[in-house]
Each structure stands twice: as C-alpha cells, then as structure tokens.
Amino acid sequence: MNETGPDIELPPASFAAGVHAVLLDNCTDSGCHSAGVGGYLISGNIDADYAATLNLVVPGNALGSKLVQKATNTSSHTGGPVLEVGTAEYELVVAWINGGALP
C-alpha cells in the first residue's frame, strides 16, 4: 500500500500503446524526423517506426540510449531538447526502454 492507495502493478510500457504517439508528437512537428533527418525516420507506420527506434535504444538502459540522450539534448541534438526530464512523456519513454523496449 502506498500513500494514494493500494499498490497496483501496471503493465510494462509498450511502443504501440504510447511511445509511438510521444515520438510522433515531439519528433515530427518541425518536419525533422518525418523527413528522416539524421538518419532517423518516423513515418507513422508503427512497425517501421518501432524498428527504426530500436536502433536508438539499449533495452534496459534508458539513460544510455541515444533516443533519450538526443531527446533531452544531453547529447548534441540539432533540434534541441524535445522531451523534458520529469514530464509524463519522458517518464513513459524511459519506462518503456527500461522495461525492455517492448513493441
């Protein structure tokens, strides 16, 4: 039991059920990754985008993943930061990667 009620185990985060939407919303707005800038293309096709995104993650190690480093601009990212540490979107992406980067 925690302060807000009983502990509830949530299912692991998945790409299709949330991460994909975060990437579409944050990484394609300026036209950068919808055009494949930097070799990373987010096309809107979940399967293709999942495959492309896996090249940027180290399952189980969000902070060591290029996706998180670029999105937070802790590693040089021409587009600047697109995810702010501590936000719900950031936490979802981190949980997804740390949970094994499931489809």
Image: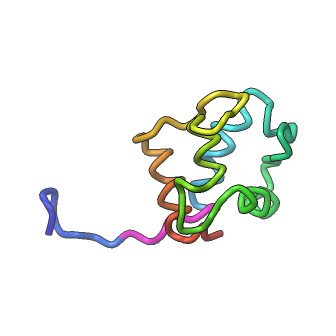
| Residues drawn in magenta | 10-15
Tell me residue 59's x, y (percent): 60, 67
Q: Is residue 27 above or below residue 53?
A: above
Q: Residue at x 65, y 49 (%)?
A: 67
Q: Is 29 on the left-hand or right-hand side of 2?
A: right
**Residue 18 colored in magenta in the image:** no
Quarter of image, res 52:
bottom right
Tell me residue 71's x, y (percent): 61, 40
Assign the magenta stretch its main secondary structure.
loop
Quarter of image, res 17:
bottom right
Name the foreground residue: 28 vs 72.
72
Colour scheme used in the picture?
Answer: rainbow
Q: Is residue 72 above or below residue 56?
A: above
Q: Residue at x 54, y 57 (%)?
A: 62
Q: Is 17 on the left-hand or right-hand side of 78?
A: left
Name the foreground residue: 38 vs 20.
38
Tell me residue 3's x, y (percent): 12, 58
Q: Quadrant of the C terminus?
A: bottom right
Q: Is residue 48 above or below residue 76?
A: below
Name the foreground residue: 20 vs 71.
71
Tell me residue 66's x, y (percent): 66, 50
Q: Is 103 on the left-hand or right-hand side of 87?
A: right
Q: Quadrant of the N terminus?
A: bottom left
Q: Is residue 34 above or below residue 60?
A: above
Counting the numbered discs, the total is: 0
Q: Residue at x 74, y 27 (%)?
A: 30
